[in-house]
Amino acid sequence: DGGITQSPKYLFRKEGQNVTLSCEQNLNHDAMYWYRQDPGQGLRLIYYSQIVNDFQKGDIAEGYSVSREKKESFPLTVTSAQKNPTAFYLCASTQIRDRRSEAFFGQGTRLTVV
Amino acid sequence: AQKITQTQPGMFVQEKEAVTLDCTYDTSDQSYGLFWYKQPSSGEMIFLIYQGSYDEQNATEGRYSLNFQKARKSANLVISASQLGDSAMYFCAMREGETSYDKVIFGPGTSLSVIP
């Protein structure tokens, strides 16, 4: 079955460490996105990529980095520069079509700083 | 400035009744799309319904319909015949622009609880 796989589901990080969240899709979608969700809040865009080897900053990119070396993969690294990384992270992708194309989401990764 | 406003942080509805979840948006673009997503407690985001700014008719998908009032910039979600499984967070979202590559921004969400 086609879909988006995020791993791990739960992740614990010590302060000062970098961690990488995985996002893989087999939907043949060109565009991929990373969102952050804090309790009781909506989703905020961190980074997005419209094509391999290219990506753009979203609204809250500081302290995060991404790469897009393959169409299927869009990993997110939460660096030690991110002051408050504890949150729920969602990866999404969109098919090439028109603006009515909905985003498909992964199951999310819950990151906790300990 | 907040582009998507959902003024109801929490809503309750009796099972089998209809409920309306409010969404207002702010954009200067003529071309945009509006989405509604459902997020159960498990965390995944489930696409429910889409409305384009140029669509002449209100969108419907099964028990979901969208009350689109373009001049008022509102896109309220109507859920008919509520079921216990409808209890979840609901997010209104907007994509400005013509392509599916443009970023999608989300509102703060409304928590819906269906009472037996």
Image: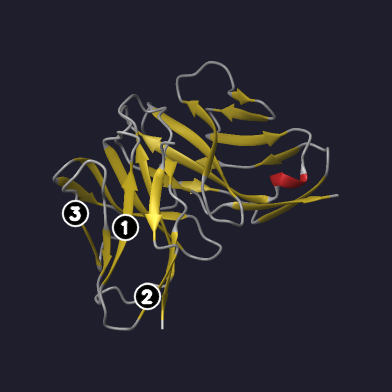
In the rendered structure, which disc, 3 or 1, sits on the residue that comes first in sequence?
1
Q: Which residue is mark 2?
A: A84
User: What's the amino acid at mark 1?
Assistant: Ser
Is residue B27 visible in the rendered image? The answer is no
Helix, strand or loop for disc 1: strand
> Is B97 drawn above or below residue A69 in the view shown?
above
CA gap, disc 3 and disc 1: 11 Å
> Residue A110, how many percent across, how many down?
45, 66
Task: Return the chain for callout 3.
Answer: A
Circle 2 crowding by C-alpha within 10 Å: few under 14, some 14–19, many from 20: few
Label 2: element kind: loop
Between A55 and A10, the one lying in front of the other is A10
Residue pointed to by mark 1: A22
* Numbered disc 3: secondary structure: loop
Q: Which residue is at the front of the view, B22 or A102?
A: A102
Picture coordinates of residue A21 (x, y %)?
A: 32, 62
Q: Is residue B45 left or right of residue B18?
A: left
Q: Write down the residue under mark 3.
A: A67
Instruction: Quote the CA–CA distance across marks 3 and 2.
Output: 21 Å
Answer left or right for B37 relative to A90.
right
The residue furthest front is A1
Q: Please tell me which residue lies in front, B25 or A1.
A: A1
Which amino acid, mark 2? Answer: Asn
Task: Residue B48: name its quadrant.
Answer: top right
Q: Residue at x 83, y 38 (%)?
A: B16
User: Which residue appears at 28% of the width and 59% of the height?
Assistant: A76
Which of pointers 1 and 2 indicates the residue nearer the eye?
A: 1
B64 is higher (above) or lower (below) than B55: below
Query: How far apart are the two marked residues, 1 and 2, measured between alpha carbons?
Result: 19 Å
Which residue is at 25% across, 74% downward?
Answer: A18
Badge 1 or badge 2: first in the primary sequence:
1
**Residue B15 visible, this angle:** yes
